[in-house]
Amino acid sequence: MYENIKERLKEYNKIVAQKNEIQLKIRELEENVGISAMAQGEAISKTYKITSQTENEAIELAAKKADLKKLISSYQLDIDRIDNALNSLYYLDKQAIEILYVQRRSVESACYMMNRSRKIIFKYANRGLKEMNDLFNLAS
């Protein structure tokens, strides 16, 4: 029950890390702009006309950067949806879901951390998953 939502929650930290890694890649690309063409001894004419190699590198860089930004946007949308759904839950429901699915801890850990029984932990988690499911289905 609610397996799709559970999987999305389990992937949450991975999605955040992937988005951050792509942002770092974009920063790295921006910092290395223009180094390769000039390092290869590319000549600049008296009119400062940009040669085709430089133009090609600039076009490739812009395309790569645009693709990476689309990917970041997609990841950020997933992150925002999950955050929005989690923030709409009752505190105990949210806490149970975060411990069980986002942090991937055991039920015993959740029982210890929340000072509740297994039955109550599952009650909170299931109630929260139902609320998240209802919210996600609103958007479809």
Image (cartoon, grey):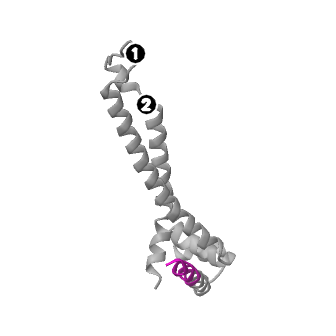
Indicate the secondary structure of the residue bearing disc 1: loop
Q: Is residue 52 left or right of residue 104?
A: left
**Magenta-highlighted stretch: main secondary structure?**
helix
Q: Tag 2: residue type?
A: Val
- Circle 2 sits on which residue? 33
Q: Which residues are magenta?
A: 129-140
- Circle 1 sits on which residue? 47
Q: Is residue 102 magenta?
A: no
Horizontal and vertical percent position of residue 22: 45, 48
Horizontal and vertical percent position of residue 73: 49, 56
Instruction: Using the image, determine if residue 68 lies above or below residue 126.
Output: above
Q: Nearer the viewer, residue 49 or 6?
A: 49
Horizontal and vertical percent position of residue 76: 52, 59
Q: Is residue 58 left or right of residue 9?
A: left
Residue placed at 61% from the left, 69% from the top? 84
- Crowd rating for badge 2 (residues with CA inside 10 Å; few <14, some 14–19, many 20+): few
Q: Is residue 139 magenta?
A: yes
Q: Is residue 92 visible?
A: yes
Residue 107 — which label?
A: none
Of mark 1 and mark 2, the one earlier in the sequence is 2
Is label 1 or label 2 in front? 1
Q: Nearer the viewer, residue 114 or 44?
A: 44
Q: Nearer the viewer, residue 119 or 74?
A: 74
Q: Tag 1: residue type?
A: Thr
Horizontal and vertical percent position of residue 105: 52, 69
Furthest-front residue in this view: 47
Q: CA distance from mark 1 to mark 2?
A: 21 Å
- Crowd rating for badge 1 (residues with CA inside 10 Å; few <14, some 14–19, many 20+): few
